[in-house]
Image (tube, rainbow, N blue to C red):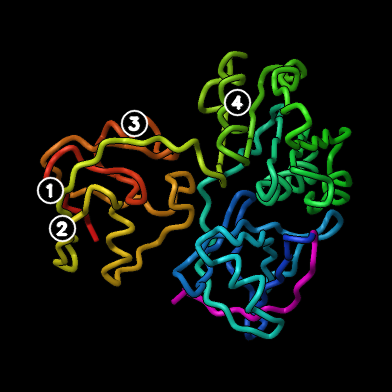
Amino acid sequence: MGQYEVTVAAIRVLTPTIRELLLRSKDGSALQSYAPGAHIEIDVETGTRPYSLLGGMPDADDPPDTYRIMVERRPEGTGGSLFLCDKVAVGATLGISAPRNNFALDTHPANRLLIAGGIGIAPIYAMARQLKRLGRPFDLVYVARDADQMAYRDEIAAVSPNPVLFHIETAEAASLDVKPLFKKLVYPSEVYVCGTHGLNKAVVAVASANGLSRLQTHEQCFAPPPVVVLDNAPFEVLLRLTGVELKIPADATILETMLANGITPKFYCGRGECGICPMTVVSADGPLEHRDHVLKPAEKESGKRICICVSRVKGSRLVLDA
């Protein structure tokens, strides 16, 4: 169960597949404050799922007792969006966590480029609202499959100090060329991108080619990377706190094995991109095989954390602090 209970105060259809939910504290008291880029985890039928907090509309913040989120209905997903879009109605009670932030916005004076792909507009919109309030310069790019899928298109245009680049990316249309986007950036500059694996990879590569370090390039991903077939070997996992021992088959992940045994750790994407599932490693009898896209190089080198949804151990036994 979540740390708090909230009531679904309103539901609004933003696009054919995207809904906006207003979540309000049950007693009208203030909810925990947060900064742009933050998310909450919501209890759904299949576990917990994170959703970015939007913060309000162009001309007003949400009241202290209200959180605003957007949910894209994904039939091929793990069930969280179907639950929130199809089964939750106004007046329903949901369990949520306190806000967490793995995609924080720095607000020091700098020139910023914000890039959103699809549902990735949620944290980018929250950042744009904050930057406008602070009078910080920024440019914004919004990529989607078609115009009907661009939630908050008018709101984004209202908060941006410069014309927004709205790019429709279909099978027939050319992919977004990110190289020209960096020509306007002058020192000091930062880039924030939230979108598909392909979009993020392209942005990070061009940012690096233009002299931006990883400290100046911030990314969050909500879509799968290309499928890579890898040779796997079975191994054992001991969950130290509960004493549970699991045998991880060659054709299953640690996360899948835990779920199959009735253990429900925190996770979201199942692809090593969201940063929700990493666990602390107590010991391992071989090197960790990191297959995620979220842990920083120093974290991977330390061997102290592992994304249980995709990563493995090149050994026979792994002990986790769980």
Q: Which residue is mark 2?
A: 238
Q: CA distance from mark 1 to mark 2?
A: 8 Å
Of the two numbered discs 4 and 3 in the rendering, the one whose residue sits closer to the viewer: 4
Along the viewing direction, whichever of 81 and 213 lies nearer the viewer: 81
Which secondary structure is most common in the magenta stretch? strand
N-terminal of the two: label 4 or label 2?
Answer: 4
Of the two numbered discs 2 and 3 in the rendering, the one whose residue sits closer to the viewer: 2
Kind of residue at disc 2:
Leu
Q: Tell me the tag on residue 228.
A: none
Q: CA distance from mark 4 to mark 3?
A: 22 Å
State yes or no: residue 40 in magenta.
no
Badge 1 vs badge 2, beta-carbon distance below 8 Å:
yes
Q: Which residues are magenta?
A: 1-15
Q: Which residue is mark 3?
A: 298
x then y, percent, for residue 183: 75, 15
x then y, percent, for residue 289: 27, 36
Q: Which residue is mark 1?
A: 317
x then y, percent, for residue 154: 88, 50
**Left or right: 166, with 126 as reference point:** right
Mark 3 is surrounded, within 10 Å at the Cα level, by few (under 14), some (14 to 19) or many (20 or more) other residues, namely: few
Q: Is residue 110 above or below residue 269?
A: above
Mark 1 is surrounded, within 10 Å at the Cα level, by few (under 14), some (14 to 19) or many (20 or more) other residues, namely: some
Screen quadrant of the N terminus: bottom left
N-terminal of the two: label 1 or label 4?
Answer: 4
Q: Which residue is mark 4?
A: 202
Q: Is residue 300 above or below residue 83?
A: above
Q: CA distance from mark 2 to mark 3?
A: 25 Å
Kind of residue at disc 3:
Ala
